[in-house]
Image (cartoon, helix red, strand yellow):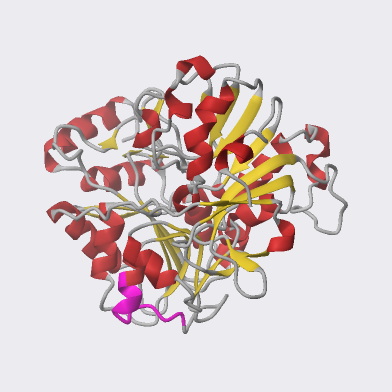
Amino acid sequence: MIAPQTAINLIQSGQYVVTAHAACEPRHFYTLLAQRAREIRDTKIFCANPSQPYPCFTDPELDGHIEIEAMFLNTKVRQGADWKHVHYVPNHMSRWAFHILTTASMPRAARKAAYWIDRTKTPVVDKPVDVFWGSCSLPDQRGFISLGLNSCYEPEILRRAKCVILEVNPRMPVTYGATTVHLDEIDYLIEQDAPLPVIGSPIPGPEEEKIGALVSELVPDGATIQLGIGAIPNAVGRSLVGRRDLGVHTEMINDAIMQLFEAGAINGSRKTMWQGKIIGGFVYGSERLYQFVDRNPAVELHPASIVNDPVRIARNYRMTSINSAIEVDLTGQVCSESVGHRSISGVGGATDTHTGAQRSAGGRGIVALRSTTKDGKLSKIVHSLAPGAKVSITRNDIDTVVTEYGIAELAGKNVAERVRAMIALAHPRFREELLHAAKREGYL
């Protein structure tokens, strides 16, 4: 057990440091990092979905001292971030651990021998990460701690790091799955008693409620579902309350999942994999959600390399993936991570789950979005994606698109059929403009 300042001084120049993300982000580390960064150089920090605009993200003088790689962005980091030392790394969530470990001193030519591709092979670099810094629960009487609300890459990286530092928080829930670690695997502990980061649960408006009702028509009893985050997934959750025997295989367990479980809609009785279990990669939401998963044997967390693996996703009968988007073009290209050239989030597991669900027997990948921006001024069904917009799901992988105006099943349809279906999903005020553009470009 060491003091936070002692721990931060263990971070040295030229190291590769990986931190836990979302509700398990190590607050001592990020609070002290800016101060320590001025004393070191060329240190790379990996993170995802930070909850606060810590000084280490916003101080322009840290360029050259540290380089922060973020796998998923949010408003807290985008505002005021100095992009000379903070960078977004495009990557599917299923490959986050792969990226972290192969980036850390492993030659590109040697990556195919990495242990998670073929676990019978000897890893090329035994301990590629210098420091893993995360959070955990209090130890139990046998010396085991829980990594709590995250398992996306944390268990894999912890065991591949030369030095492991964890902030012990008595408020951290104990979860089951891949999150259990013995104290023998940890080098240093730091006391941390603070509320865990939470995210709000947006209240659906009338448009979102219509979308939720339409999506629920596509989800039969007994289906296994994946829900994203935001007002639309919350509306979908409300509309699914009447379903029975639903299962869950999702990257993020949120409040909507908890509410469906408490309503009796989710029991996992018809699941093909992990029957009866709510399976996820991490938990992020309200304090009540954290209480719900604490020591709950119905919930298990596993690495995203497993949970978000499209092949494993496909093994779930009637797997239904429900994600949202920023805009979708008339041929089915989906942008869910940027507004033009400006990255605002990340692809996360959207492509993993969307493509995996389509390979499932009776499965479906759904992209649900409002037809317009909230002020109604811009159409989110567009002739062409905005210049610089990033394609999160290609038109070759698109399945089903839903707005408050209906459902478009695009998989297997030709371009002209897709264009007609997508125009029908647009707000009536924009349909004539979209039709004219489609004819001008020869789509119709």
At x 32%, y 39%, the residue is: 326
Q: Position of residue 322 (x, y in %)?
A: 38, 58
Q: Residue furthest bottom?
A: 269
**Rendering coords of residue 212 (x, y %):** 24, 61
Asked whether residue 264 is drawn in magenta, I would say: yes
Residue 213 is situated, as x and y percent measured from the top left of the image, at 22, 64
115 vs 73: above or below: below
Q: Nearer the viewer, residue 415 or 316?
A: 316
Q: Which residue is at 48% across, 78% downward?
A: 298
| In the displayed structure image, the side of residue 20 where residue 380 appears, left or right | left
Among the 4 quarters of the image, the one containing residue 418:
top left
Quadrant in which the C terminus is drawn: top left
Q: Is residue 61 left or right of residue 1?
A: left
Left/right of residue 198 with respect to residue 394 in the rendered view: left
Q: Which of 396 and 67 lies nearest the eye of the viewer?
A: 67
Task: Give the image quarter of residue 312.
Answer: bottom right
Q: Residue at x 51, y 46 (%)?
A: 26
Count the labels in the image. 0
Q: Is residue 84 left or right of residue 306?
A: left
Q: Which residues are magenta?
A: 259-268
Q: Specify the principal SS of the magenta part.
A: loop
Q: Where on the picture, by quarter, is residue 76?
A: top left
Does the magenta segment cover residue 105?
no
